[in-house]
Image (cartoon, rainbow, N blue to C red):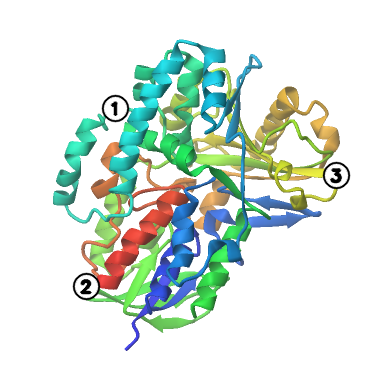
Amino acid sequence: MTRRAVVVGAGFGGLALAIRLQSAGVATTIVESRDKPGGRAYYWEQEGFTFDAGPTVITDPACLEELWALSGQKLADDVTLDPVQPFYRLNWPDGTNFDYTNDDSVLRAEIAKLNPADVAGYAKFLDYAAGVYHAGYEKLGTVAFLDFASMVKAAPALAKYQAWRSVYSIVSKFVQDERLRQALSFHTLLVGGNPMTTSAIYALIHKLERDGGVWFARGGTNRLVAGMVALFERLGGTLRLSDPVTKIETLGDRVTAVETASGWRETVDMVAANADIMHVYRDLLPESGAARRTAARLERKRYSPSLFVVHFGVKGTWPGIPHHMILFGPRYKGLLDDIYEHGMLSEDFSLYLHHPTVTDPSLAPEGDSTFYALAPVPHLGKYTGDWETVRPILEKRILDEVGRRLIPDIHDRIVTKFSYAPTDFAHDLNAHLGSAFSLEPILTQSAYFRVHNRDDAIPNLFFVGAGTHPGAGIPGVVGSAKATAALMLEA
């Protein structure tokens, strides 16, 4: 008899898991509350411009190719990935640029421009990053941590690489120039982590990018989502859109059925949640006392910040602005403290600028360009101001900064614009506190200490996505799908 599974949420993790289950012969239905799949990788079309909500940095394409290979198919049949070079251009307020790439000679020249003495230190950092990549990503990234014994087994590797230290602390051991320290530690922000407190294990991202490159899905990240959906449906899977799950039914210690707002109800052998972890435990499991206790524990955890994103389409093309830029503000640690600890909306900010039309002009009308500018901001538990009042003010300040540093007449060129705030994350994605990345990736909330890929009290309830091991980012949530699928297929 074919087993039946429901996956709650059509984000990258949910799609990757559903593909694995369906490929293995489990009859799988994905239920998604929004009108389009993708979760945080949603998109909008406005006045001829296509705007990806994010994520927009694709690394480790091999973890995606593996999903198609499960059924003898090829990623390239559904999705075209274009390489992005440089990976990022980092820019500081004094006008310094640093092009971040995996071309070793170019990268070493860029480092030498900042501080010639740091070229040798960078080589030592790269050795360190390669070690943690092997120990933390290749060996542990797709393996579930269900009991403390699994954490004990990983402890020697964690100790060897001083996992209790922060990424910034480790980087600072190898290089002296402050700008280079920022260049080699900012990546944790892309998965919700503070470089000053996130475990040094996350230095593996540098090695991941160097080996696998940085890529962009032609047509936008939404086309990668569409390709995953096409693969899932070819395999016989079912995707239900615009139908929020309202209840996961339980009987004793088993999940028995899933109900949705439309009245649809499916009896199941297994359920996997790609939805926000607090939303699942607090709102979707009303009959489970164990779920209520877990929700109470999760409420006391530390959550990643939110984001404020300004999407804008402008007249003109900008071949001199690369696909990805990081516009650092005048402060690094102080700004991070304001976001993560003090819950302040600072006068200054650092921005990630996404400019996809320099790689793929089809995302805007001919002769125009699509951008977004993203600023990390405190989540709703730390900053409790009125976001509808703040929204237009912060929107203008961010555009002013992009104008001051890159596009002087930006306000005259704007064809269309809109912003996405922490309250939107909370409303559209049921994100606890409007967090953009779920649990903050500190050591005491990683691996065994994160939400387990299989629930401890309900053995046919599983989790996938940013809130479970290994964490946020496309490789992270696709890795979580591999770990969770292994548990579900042996259940």
Name the residue that disc number 1 marks. Answer: 165
**Residue at 26% across / 62% down in the picture?**
455
Say what amino acid the circle numbered 2 marks. Answer: Asp
Q: Earlier in the sequence, mark 2 or mark 3?
A: 2
Q: In the picture, residue 79 is in which quadrant? A: bottom right
Q: Is residue 382 visible?
A: no
- Where does residue 359 sit, x and y in percent of width and height? 70, 44
| Residue 147 position (above or below residue 261) | above
Mark identifier at residue 367: 3
Q: Distance from label 2 to label 3 (Cα)? A: 59 Å
- Where does residue 394 sit, x and y in percent of width and height? 65, 33
| Residue 94 position (above or below residue 392) | above
Say what amino acid the circle numbered 3 marks. Answer: Gly
Q: Earlier in the sequence, mark 1 or mark 3?
A: 1
Q: Nearer the viewer, mark 2 or mark 1?
A: 1
Q: Secondary structure at mark 3?
A: loop
Q: In the picture, residue 398 is in which quadrant? A: top right
Q: Earlier in the sequence, mark 2 or mark 1?
A: 1
